[in-house]
Image (spheres, rainbow, N blue to C red):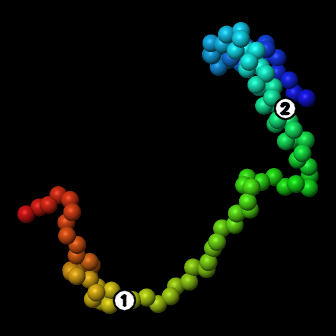
Amino acid sequence: MPSISRDEVAHLAKLARLAVTDDELDLFAGQLDVILQSVSAVGDIATADIPPTSHAVPLTNVFREDVVRPSLGQAKTLAGAPSAEDGRFRVPRILGEEA
C-alpha cells in the first residue's frame, strides 16, 4: 500500500512554495495517503480484459454521407424575400446608420 510520509509532504509543500504548519503536515499526510491508496485500489481492479475508457458510457459520432442534392435556385430563394438587390437579400442596416 502506498504511503506518504510527513517529510515527503513537507518537501512537496516546499517545492510548491506553500507555507504549511506542523499540524497541517500531519493532516495533509493523512489525506494524501488516503488518496494514494484509493488510486492504487483502482489500479488493482484494472485488468487486461477491461479496456481503458475515457467515458462511462460509450460514445459514437453520428455521421452521414455528404451528398449533393438539388436545392432552390437563386431566383426562387429571393422570390420569397421582402427585399432583394443584386442577387442577394437586402436587410435593414443595424449598425452605423448612415444617411
Residue at image position (21%, 63%) is 94
User: Do residues under tags 2 and 1 come within 8 Å of each other at their CB atoms?
Assistant: no
- Pair 2/1: label in front: 2
Residue at image position (14%, 61%) is 97
Residue at image position (87%, 27%) is 2
How far from the left and from the top, in percent, is residue 80? 28, 87
Task: Say which quarter of the image contains residue 86.
Answer: bottom left
Quick one: quadrant of the C terminus?
bottom left
Which residue in the protein does label 2 denote? 37
Q: Secondary structure at mark 2?
A: helix
In this rendering, position of residue 8 left or right of residue 49: left
In this rendering, position of residue 44 left or right of residue 74: right
How far from the left and from the top, in percent, is residue 44? 91, 41
Which residue in the protein does label 1 denote? 73
Quick one: quadrant of the N terminus?
top right
User: Does residue 9 show up?
Assistant: no
Task: Say which quarter of the image contains residue 91.
Answer: bottom left
How far from the left and from the top, in percent, is residue 61? 66, 67
